[in-house]
Amino acid sequence: MLLGTWNLENLYRPGGPYGPRDEAAYATKLASLAAVITELDPFLLGVQEVGDPEALKDLAGMLGDDWHTVLSEHADGRGIRVGFLSRAEPVVLADTAGFPAGLRPVQVDDSGATAAAAGRGVLAVEVGDEPLRVAVCHLKSKLLAYPDGRFHPRDEGERARYGAYALYRRAAEATALRALADELLDGDGQGRDVAILGDLNDETQAATTQILLGPPGSEIGTAGYDRPDRGDAARLWDVAPLIPAGQRWSRVNAGRRELIDHVLLSHRLVRRVSAAGTGLPGEGPPALPSVGPDPGERRDAPGSDHAPVWVRIDG
């Protein structure tokens, strides 16, 4: 069984302000995405940046008749949201954007405006007979947007402030995602198959990513990994260390390779991982374009600026 996550990069039908400008560019994008998914052949794929629900249906239609789609109802200001492409029919367990109790709204701009919910919803489903419980997310980006539609700051003070606002939001959203993970684990990570998939918009050692892992001390590659303890019931393991070092990135930002898309697994699942990677299995390092701060520069580009991240589960 292969599980994966993939940011599809602005999946819209043509004609709007964000997606491809014409039908030809749209058809090329769909064909490129469908070719990757067909070769990847996932049992379940968490997806991000679906701007038009009908566009995901168009993509699924290119994959064959045995695919199911489900999307969060919580979209951001551009209409993008998370969802799943699944071989088995998914049952929705949760679709939420709210912050957990005790977490106050966070500042989002210089006006003092605050947010009390995630910019994009977190969707959790259950699939299969075991069953498998999976949540998909898309946390706040590190790419900064400034007032009046600008992607470049007026000065370094503005850059620092808006970087902080983005970090506040990403940390709050990670906390909300961790609260949902607690519900899915239900104190039994040794007995439950639980996965968290998504674009976390930061790397493995980032504080926002670490929020999701639970009790420290048993990460893959550490001495504690093979020593069971009570924390295993609540832990999630980031599979990043299992990805070959020469493939350990999912996006290239201004020439810098970053692993910002992640797969996190419960104790029961991580012990059954036989392989993990980015891009397509057996094809080596992902070939990705280097992107800048303005997402509009790639609106007619085929494919995605992210590579899929995946794990293969045995048994």
Image (cartoon, rainbow, N blue to C red):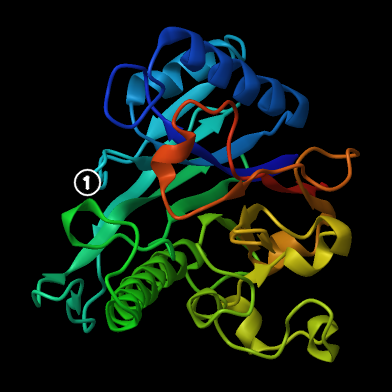
Determine which quarter of the picture holds residue 158. bottom left
Q: Is residue 265 above or below residue 50?
A: below
The x, y position of residue 302, in whole percent, is 58, 25
The x, y position of residue 285, in whole percent, is 84, 48
> Does 111 sit left or right of 146 as displayed?
left
Q: Which of 276 and 287 lies nearest the eye of the viewer? A: 287
Residue at 22%, 46% (x, y): give it: 77
> Does 42 sit left or right of 11 as displayed?
right
The x, y position of residue 253, in whole percent, is 59, 58
Q: Is residue 308 above or below residue 148?
A: above
Q: Element at badge 1?
A: loop
| Circle 1 residue | 77
Quarter of the rendering occupied by the N terminus? top right
The x, y position of residue 119, in whole percent, is 27, 57
Q: Which of 215 and 113 lies nearest the eye of the viewer? A: 113
The reply to whether residue 96 is visible in this rendering is yes
Amino acid type, callout 1:
Gly
Residue at 25%, 70% (x, y): give it: 99
